[in-house]
Image (tube, rainbow, N blue to C red):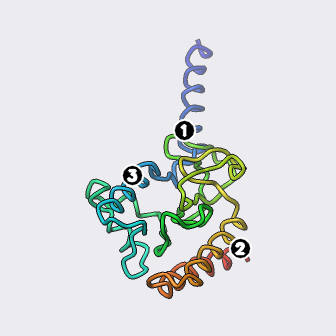
Amino acid sequence: MLVVVATPVALIAAALCWYFFLLDWEGRPYCHKQIYLAFGIWMQDQQTNAFPNAGGSSQHSLEMIREEMGGSMRWAEHYRYVAGLREDDPGDLILMYYDRPTRWTWHGAPPPSVFKEKAWIVVPVDFTTPAWRRPAGPGEMSERVSSQEFRRRLRATLEFVRTNARPHWEAVLAEHTRVLDAHEQDQE
């Protein structure tokens, strides 16, 4: 009788332990296809090939596509956006990135376990993920990259914005350099 009662209790306890303690529910990215479509609609309406740029500010620039995203900005809470880029810029530049490393690969996957290594999710300017840039598995119009690769590509993106004197490049550099500096301090 004890075995009949203890077995289901043990199975339920194991399932609950897995669900609440071994799955990582934090750091789930937003649907990048929806963001891609919102940028496309906004650029078409504005008749431009430049992504939104509101004074070089990440959050204010993302607010420019609020209506295309259903009027909400909740999706943008954990994203940083590099203003000043254009649709025809080199595809490996970082347009946006999740604001911290995460175990997630894309929003539609099952929650990863706490044993999966964290990585940065970056959305490139061309919104593609070529096979040669997918070392950690497929993303949804994004890539999972190591901290070292994230820093290298963000620096390259900021240098591109600066050398091409994009509008408000000083504000863009200031905002994202703070992110790089904070990230490098965390690594020490």
For the point 72% across and 67% down, the residue is 148
Circle 3 residues within 10 Å: few <14, some 14–19, many ≥20: few
Most extreme residue toward the top, as rendered? 1
Identify the residue at horizontal 60%, vertical 32% (top origin): 14
The C terminus appears in which quarter of the rendering? bottom right
Left or right: 58, with 100 as reference point? left
**Residue 66, relative to residue 22: is it above or below?**
below
The answer to whether residue 147 is above or below residue 13 is below
Q: Is residue 2 visible?
A: yes
Residue ID for mark 2: 187
Amino acid type indicated by mark 2: Gln
Amino acid type, mark 3:
Leu
Residue underneath mark 3: 37
Determine whether the residue tagged by mark 2 lies in a helix, strand or loop: helix
Q: Nearer the viewer, residue 187 or 140?
A: 140
Viewer-closest of 149 and 90: 90
Q: Return the x and y of residue 141 as percentages of the image width and height.
A: 54, 50
Mark 3 or 1 closer to N-term?
3
Tag 3 or tag 2, which sits nearer the N-term?
A: 3
Q: Who's the residue at 67% across and 79% down the image?
A: 185
